[in-house]
Amino acid sequence: MVIAGCDVGSLSAEAVIMKDGSIVASEIIRVRPRPEQSASDVMDAALSKAGMTYKDIEGCFSTGYGREKIPFASGNISEISCHGKGAQWLIPSVRTVIDVGGQDCKVIKVDENGKLVNFVMNDKCAAGTGRFLEFMAKVLGIGIEDLGPQGLSSEQPVSITSFCSVYAETEVLHSIYEGKAVADIAAGINHAMSERVKALVKRVGVEEDICITGGVAKNTGVVKNLEAALQVSAQKLTVDPQLIGALGAALFAREALANQNR
Amino acid sequence: MVTKEAEELTQICETLSNPYLEDWKKEGGKIVGYACTYVPEEIIHAAGMLPYRIRGTGCVGTSLADTWLTRIANCSFARSILELALTGEYDFLDGVVFNNGCDHTRRGFENWKAQQNTPSFMYMLPVPHVITDDGLQWYREEVNSFKDAMEQSFGIEIKDEKLKEAVKVYNETRSLLKQLYELRTQKNPPISGAETLKILLASVSMPREKFNQLLRELLIEIRSREGISDYRARLMLVGSINDDPELIELIEDIGGLVVTDSLCFGARFFWDLDEETGDPMDSITARYYYHIPCPRMYGALPQRLDFLMSAVKEAAVDGVILQSIKFCDLHGVENVLEQKALEKAGIPTLKIEREYGPLADTGRFRTRVQAFLEQIGK
Amino acid sequence: MVRTPTLWEETAALMGGVAALPEDVSALEALAADLPPDAASLLKGFTNPHYVKMSIVGLKIFNTALTSILERRAQGKKVAFYCFNFPRELLDAMDMAPVCTEAAGIIPVLALGCEQYIDAPINAGLPDSICGGHKASVGMIIEEAEMKPDVIINAGPGSCDPNAKLHEWMAETWEVPIFNLDAPYYHDERSFQYYRREFRRMVEGLEGVTGQKVDYDRLREILENSNEQVELYWEIQELKKAKPYPLSNIYCVLVELMKYIWSGRPEAVEYFKIARDTAKDLVAKGEGAFPNQRARTLWTYSGVYFDMELFRWLEQVGVAFVQDCFGWYPDKVIDTSSIDTMIEGLADRTLNQPMTRQHKGAWDGPAGWAEDMMFLSKELDIDACIYSGNLACKQTWGCLRLITDKLKNELGIPTLRLETDILDKRITPGSVIKEQIEEFISTLG
C-alpha cells in the first residue's frame, strides 16, 4: 500500500511517501507564492525520488496552513493532530510533542494510539517561534543554522529578558556594543527562546516521553536549553523533525484507507 | 410561502445601514445607538425612536481608532466601533447610549464623546457591578434619569402607555427568538448558528414591529426545512462579544455546527422577559438588571454557570468553544472558570484567544477548531 | 528532609538581614554588592544619603509586615486578602492576618524577581493580560498552596476589570468566601451613601463568615494612627512644592507600600515623621534631596518596580519623582467618635482610593483621572509627565491620549509614554526604560 502526506506551512512545504508502513521518500522545499504550487512541487520531487507517479498513491492527506487547497489530497487534517500522530508513530512512548515552527509553536498531547488529547498554541506574536530566532540571528549577523552550534560553546550566556522581539533586539544590540562574544549572545538567544517555549509547555503540562518537532528542533542549543528548563530529555527522532507533519498526514491517509476497505 | 422580505431578513446585517433604516430616517424618525445588553431598548422605543445596537460591521482597519484606544492594550471590537464612529459611519445616529460595561467600552465612549462631531445626545447609563436590592434601586434611578435625559434632550414625553406597548413588542421578539433557539436543539437543526446570528443582528437594526412580523413568517419557513444533518459536532459558542457571522461560518464550514450560545449578541440578549403587568419602568428595570448576567456582574457566577449547563444539556452539545477577544479580561478570566465547570461535567472545551473582525487571524482560529473536532473524535 | 522556604519566608529572611543594617549608605551598598541582581537593585533604590533613616525604617516595615502575617497565620488567624484600594485598618481591627493581594506579590518580586511565580497563573490558563500586580501573588499561592486566603475582599468592581475579575477567580478557585464592594460610577453624595451601605454589608458579611468581630476600641486606636499618617502626608505634600525637590524618589514608592501593608501602625507613622523631618530640614537649608535637578515629574500611572534601582538612577540624572497617581491619597481625617463615624469614614476613604476614585469616568468624570492629573500638575509645579504604561491597564491606555493631549494643550506639559509590565522585567527591560527616559528628559530643555 502506497500512501502520502503533504504539509504546506507558512515557510516550508514537505511531502512524505510511505510504502507498506515505512517511509520511502520525502522532500522539503521553501514555499511558493501559492499553496497549490508548493504542494505539487514538493510532491513531484518526492515522487521522482521514489520513482513513482501520482497514480501509485492510494491515499494522500494534507495538513498545514494550505491544507484545504491541495488538489491531489483526499482529505485534510490539522497540523496539530498530524504532529502528534507522526511523532507518536515514530516513538510509541511519546505523549507530549512540542512543535516549534516558523510562525507558531504548539504543544500537543497524544494517547498511546497517537490520538490528540489536548493541545495549546502560542497566542503571542513572534515570541517562541522560528521567526524570533531568524530575527535574532540576523541582528547578530550569523546564519540561523549557526545559532545552535555557536551557543553550545558559550560558558557565559548573556541575559536576554524581553519577550518582545523588538526589545530583545535592543538587548542583543547592547550586548554587541558591550563587546560580548557572539557565542555568548547566541547562547542567550537560545536560552530566551527556550524560556518562551517552556512557558507554553507549562500550560498543558509535561507528560513523558516528549519529543520536539518542527524546524527549531534542529537548533541543538534551543533543544538543550529546553530539556534543562523542563527537566526532561527529549526523545531523538530518526527522521528530519520538519517532516513530522507530513508523516502524520500520511498516517491519517492510511487510517482512512483502512476504514474504507473494512 | 415565505415573502421575499422575510427571506432577505438575513441580509440586513451585512451593512450598518439598511433600507428600513433609510426609510425610517426619511420619514423623520430618530435613531439612538446603544452598546450593551444593559441599556433598556424599550425606553428608546417608547420615545418613538429606533434603538440600534452599535456593532463593528464593515470595519476594515482601526488605524484612526488606534490613536485613541491603543492597539497594545485595548480590545479590537471596541476599537472597531470607535473607528466606524470616527470615520462617520455612525453619523446616522441621533443619540448614543453606553454603559460602564467594561473598561474598553467605557473608555471607547469617552473617546467618542470627546470628538467634535458627535450626535448631540451622548449618554452614559451606569450599571452597578453587583446584584443586590440596593443595586436594583440604583439602577432604577439611573434608568429614570436616562428617561428624563431623553425627554429633555429630544423635547418629548415618554408615556407609560408607550412603555407598555414597547414591553409587548420586545417581549414578542424575545419569544420568537427563543423559538428559533428551540429549533436549534433538534437533532437536525433547521438553522445554522451563522444564520441565527444574522437574524439576531437584524432584530437590533430595524423597526422592531416589522422585524417581528418578518421573523414570524420566516419561522414558518424554517420549521418546514429538512434540517442540517451533515455536521461533525454540535458546538456551543461562549465568551466575548461577537457580531460577526463569519466567525461562526468559519466553525461551521469545517463541520462544527453551532447550536447554542451564551453570548451577548446571543442568548444573553433576549432570553429573559419583561413582566407585562405593573409599572412598566419597574418591570423593564428588573428585566435588564436581572437578565442572564454578563461576567461584569460580580457574585453572579452561579447564575451564569446554571445557564451554561442548561444550554449544554438542552442543545445536546458535544463541545464548547470558549473564546475571548485579546485583552478582554472579563471573558478571559470567566472562560477559565467556565472551562473548569464544563470539564468537571465531562464536556470537552476549546479555549481560544482571538482578534475581532478585520484583525482576526482566521487561519489560526480554524486550525484550532479543526484540531478540537479531531480531538473530540468527530 | 528540610522544607524549602516559601517565597515569603525567603523574602522575609532577606529583608530581615537588611533591616539589621546600620543607618549608613555604604553598608547598604556593600550588602547590595553581595546579593543577587534583583535584591541588589532593590537596595540600590534606597541609597539616597539624606534618606537612609527613612529607607531603613521602610525596609524594616516590609519585614515586620511579612513576619506579622506569617505569625498571625501560624496562630490560626484568618488570612484575609484585600485589593490595594481597600483600607487594611478594618481587617487589622478584626484581628485577621490581612494580606494585600498586590503587595503579596510585589514585595517578593522586588527582592527576588521570581518569574516562575509570575508565569504560574498564565500556566493555569488565565489570560496574559491580567495585571502584573496580581500574577506573582496568585502564582505564589498556586505554587505554595499554604498561602491561601480564608476570605477575600474585592474592591475592584467598578474601578478595574482585571483586578475585580482576578479576585473573583481566586475566590472560585480556592473556594473561599468573597465580598464585593461595588464602586458606583459617580462621586457625589448619592454615590457615597450607596457605597457606605455596600461597606456596612461587607463588614457584616465578613463578621458572619469569619466569626471575628470588629474590635472598635482597637479600630479607634488604629485609625488615630492612620489619621496622624494622613496629616503627615498632607504636610509632606506641601513640602513637595519646594525647589529644589526635597524628598528622595523612594518616598513615593514607600508611601504606597505603607498604605498597602502597614497603614495604621505606629511604624508607618514613624516612617512619615522621618520623611517629614528630613524634608523640612532640607527645605530650611534650601537644599534638595539630590543635586543637579533637571525636571519635576508626575508619573500619571505608577512607577516601574521590577528594577528599584531606577528610582535612585533618576536622582542621579536629576529627575524628581514628585508624585504618581497610585500614591495620590486625598484622604480625610476620620472622625473616631463613634462606630458609625468610623465605618462611614472608612467607606468614604475607600471610595477615594487611587484607581477607584479616578477610573470610573476617567476623562470627564468628577475626580476622574484627567481632573486629578491636571490638579496635581498645577499643584506640584510639574515639568513633565511619565506614563509607566502597565500593559494590563486597559482603562488608562484607553484614554491616555485624551489625558496627555489635555496636559499638553492646557498646561504645556509633555508626557513620555512607556510600555511596560511594572513588575515583569521581561516585557520592557530596565535598560530600555532608562534610555527612553533619558532621551525624553533631554528634550525638555
Image: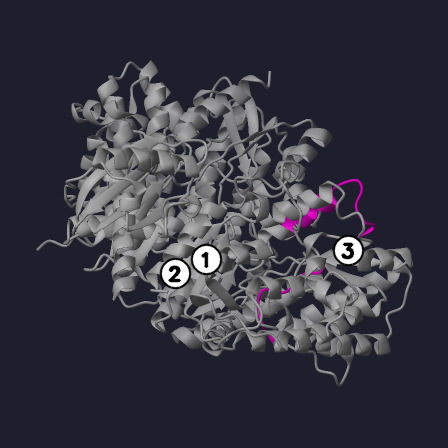
Q: Are marks 1 and 2 in contact (CB under 8 Å)?
A: yes
* Mark-to-mark CA distance, 1 and 2: 9 Å
Which three-letter amino acid code belongs to the residue tagged 3? Answer: Asn
Q: Quadrant of residue C284?
A: top right
**Which chain letter matches label 1?**
B
Earlier-in-chain disc, 1 versus 2? 1
**Which chain letter matches label 2?**
B
Earlier-in-chain disc, 3 versus 2? 3
| Left or right placement of residue C391 versus residue C20 in this view | right
Q: Specify whether disc 3 shares its chain with disc 1.
A: yes
Which three-letter amino acid code belongs to the residue tagged 1? Answer: Ile
Residue receiving disc 3: B18
Q: Residue furthest front?
A: A55
Q: Residue furthest left?
A: C1
Q: Are marks 3 and 2 in contact (CB under 8 Å)?
A: no
| Residue A180 pos. (x, y %) | 26, 17
Residue receiving disc 2: B373
**Which chain letter matches label 3?**
B
* Mark-to-mark CA distance, 3 and 2: 37 Å
Check if residue B129 falls in the magenta segment: yes
Secondary structure beneath label 3: loop
Q: Are marks 3 and 1 in contact (CB under 8 Å)?
A: no
Judge the density around disc 1: few (<14), some (14-19), many (≥20) Cα neighbours within 10 Å. Answer: some
| Residue A104 pos. (x, y %) | 37, 41
Q: Which mark is residue C98?
A: none
| Left or right placement of residue C56 versus residue B132 in this view | left
